[in-house]
Image: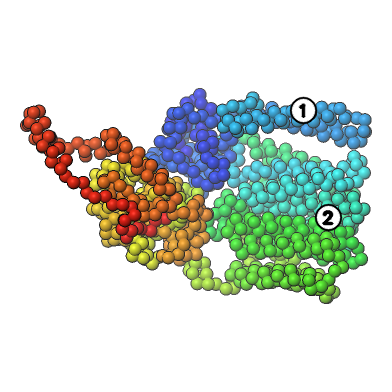
Amino acid sequence: MLFSLRNVCTTDDTVNLFTLACALRPASSIARPWFMTWSTIETLISSGTLITNIPCHRYLWNIHVCLTDFDNLMDNFACDGSHDEIMFRSCEDYDNFTENQLIGFDQSCVVLLIISLSISLACGHQIAGLSSPGFGQSATAACYLLVTLVGAYFGCGRLLSFITQGRVEAPGTGLRRRAGGQGSGVRAPEDCNDVVPVGLVMNLLSASVIACPLLAVVPQLAPGHVPWLWTAAVFQLVVCVLSYRSMDSLTATFYGFTSILRFAEGYSALLTAFSIHTSSPIPFPVVFAVLFFILALFSCQKSLAEGLYQLFYVAYTIALAAQPSLSFQSGAQGVQAAIFVVSAVMLLVTSYNNVSAKRIPTGEGVFKALVTRVSSLTLRPHDRHSQAPYLGYSRYADAEVLGHACSVLAVFSITASMGDRAPLGVLVLPWAVVAGGVLQLLVGSVAFSRGKTLESMAFVLYGVMWSVWGLTRYGGLYGDTRGFNLAVGIISFLLFNSLVTVGALFLSVAWVVYAATFHLIIISFLLDAMGALPYGYDIGVSIVFGLMSFYCFLSGLFSLTFLTPQLPLGRALVRLSGTGGGGKDICLHVPARKATAVHQIAEIMKSGGICGMPTDTVYVLVAACNRPDAVEKAYKCKQQAQDRPMSLWVSSINQLEPVRSLLSALLWDFMSAAWPSSISMVIARGPWMEMFGLGESAKHIGTPQSIAIRNPNCAVATHLINLVGPIAVTSANPTGEADTTHHNQVYAKLGDKVDGVLCDGPSPENIASTVVDCTKIDSGHIGFFRVGLIPKSQVLQIFEEVQKRHSHGQINPGFEADLTEPDPNPNLTDPQRNTEEDNTESTESSTVPPPTQSPANMDTSTLTTQP
């Protein structure tokens, strides 16, 4: 959401609200919703808090500002809920947004320019020095010295800025950049992957290393090139992971492929130090060429230039397949020289399009235009939320495409027979260990972050299996040794894979076949360890598993690209009753970080539905108080015990304004001081309960003597309550079971009984709220039914501060009118009035104060279910 910057900043300020919001928001919570009240914003602006060095425009679409007067906000600005993009209703609103943007050439660009030019000159002199040893050595040293000095200055400047929190900043070291917006031409995060230039630079690096022998810079690849190639490989693995973080599965898959090539190239160069010449009796890289070609076709949906760029790697892998030695020489070097030129062009175009208002055409709409002409094809709409997992959300895109492709590479590589050659002489190790091992482990980690527990377990198990078997069989670790002692570990893998196969029955037919065929692969490993492997068996089962993996690879790409048609994976062979298993309708599950999702849940609750909701502690089950039928349903759906009644929650103390006159001034001030927080207050029940529209369902809220009430310290929860009104709350778990700390647990326990779930991943805390007894607060005492997230000392400190204010006459202004009683004897003179007051004081002083109750002796029957 957005509001007029003119109401907050003057035209002379170089700060906008989004810069301020990005600066105040923790870096670890960039993808989570963040709310700031209007009063907080006014306080920060009035105090002179001006932040000018935060690159905010990349996170413009992830910031949510929750204002108290939400309706007035929507009168001026609109937010497209499907894309979370900013739209302005008038030119004046747009001027208010753009007049405070940072425009101009940043001093930090000069520093970075000097560093880049110095590195380029140093590398140029160093290349010339390799051709002629007497040329350019002093110039190379001077350039590297300049890079060292400028880099040290820039690093120290940024460190100083970090230590002083931006108050002290060396000239030219600020990371200020042009701000982008809807009208600036800078792409939104949905369309932009900032790490792609890093991957292209690594392609430049590796291509220059491979092509150097072709240009006679060096005679051949040598062990000295290995650090460069493997550094590029590691960086491209990082690019792969960050591309998944950017919800860009196709780019992540491509750089996963290129990292495998970098490791293989470095491995081949490393073996030259041991006078081992690698070879492959089969044209295995042809399989890699097929995978690259298919990926290039589907990558055309992003841009035609990207698809054409990936075709160069098709040519490169075909050139490798044409060389039985796989020595990365001759034709492969020529293709790498071409890749160097094309990568440089792609780097220039990508970097320019990422930061410039004007764009270099890359054919982004060509694929879509062609597909729309085919009636049988329907493209899948793409945004950051199109790859949301089945339950809730994830910060990573789906990685199964890369996982299945790596299975194809690993399994076809082991069809190579060693014969009489040394194990290291057959170039299988990098394909089996890197593709089948390292990349599979990465895919398993991403799958786990998306809540795909079984798929994650399968990829991790297969990754470990490929790594162990690749190192033992093709790394020469056990040589010619065969026997049962080698087979013990493989038997354990067989048992684990049997569990995966059984679990796959609940996923799909394709996963069952996938796991079962890998079972055959493990059996071939077992037979080889025992020295009883039949001729051709391993090749046969490898081809079967490879084809199944290839089908899953294609199915994943079709699923990412098209709504129709798709390659089916089949239905689950076993379906259990309950959520997701018995064919019952599954309730709505939406990510809590989206404002539109919160509105969806609010509409469900207004219609009488019950929903699961994240809080500042654990997940809870909620119903609107003005819908008695919903409160009754929430109470019954989890078989609530009679001694565990529901509680009442509000978004702020303002929602209790209609009943303020029925509450004591001390209690009201204590609530104002303690909320919002993880503190539940048990107060005396009264007729004020009727004002919330509970009707007959009021009997389920609290006990006949008391009721628990709370204002949670959670932006999502308070925003939802602000839309719905006060809500009835109970923990989102059947009575007697542990609290639910993840939205998946809400599904597992109550998924078929609720109408919706706001999904926010794991709970921030696993500890319930602190329950404070305020039924005797007017006598100056509070007690504790339960000490939870908020410690007892902190609650007592808050209460003591409120008591001190009352003892000094600092009463809440809202109660001053109630405490000022009308004069019952307006006709009395001052002497008569003084005499009457003296008599009243004498009577009050003889009254014995009521006895107080020790917290240890309290009746705990009023304890309610408090998350």
Picture coordinates of residue 853 (x, y %)? 28, 52
Viewer-closest of 306 and 317 = 317
Quadrant housing residue 39: top left
Element type where label 1 sits in the image: helix
Give the number of the mark in front: 1 or 2.
1
Name the colour scheme. rainbow
Q: Which mark is residue 146?
A: 1
Residue drawn at 83 percent across, 29 percent down: 141
Viewer-closest of 53 and 683 = 683
Viewer-closest of 567 and 223 = 223
How many neighbours does mark 2 have within 10 angstroms: few (below 14), some (14-19), or many (20 or more)? Answer: many
Assign the C terminus to one quadrant of the image: bottom left
Using the rendered image of the protein, determine whether residue 408 is visible from the camera's viewpoint. no
Against 810, is 539 above or below? below
Residue drawn at 60 percent across, 37 percent down: 185
Residue labelled with disc 2: 318
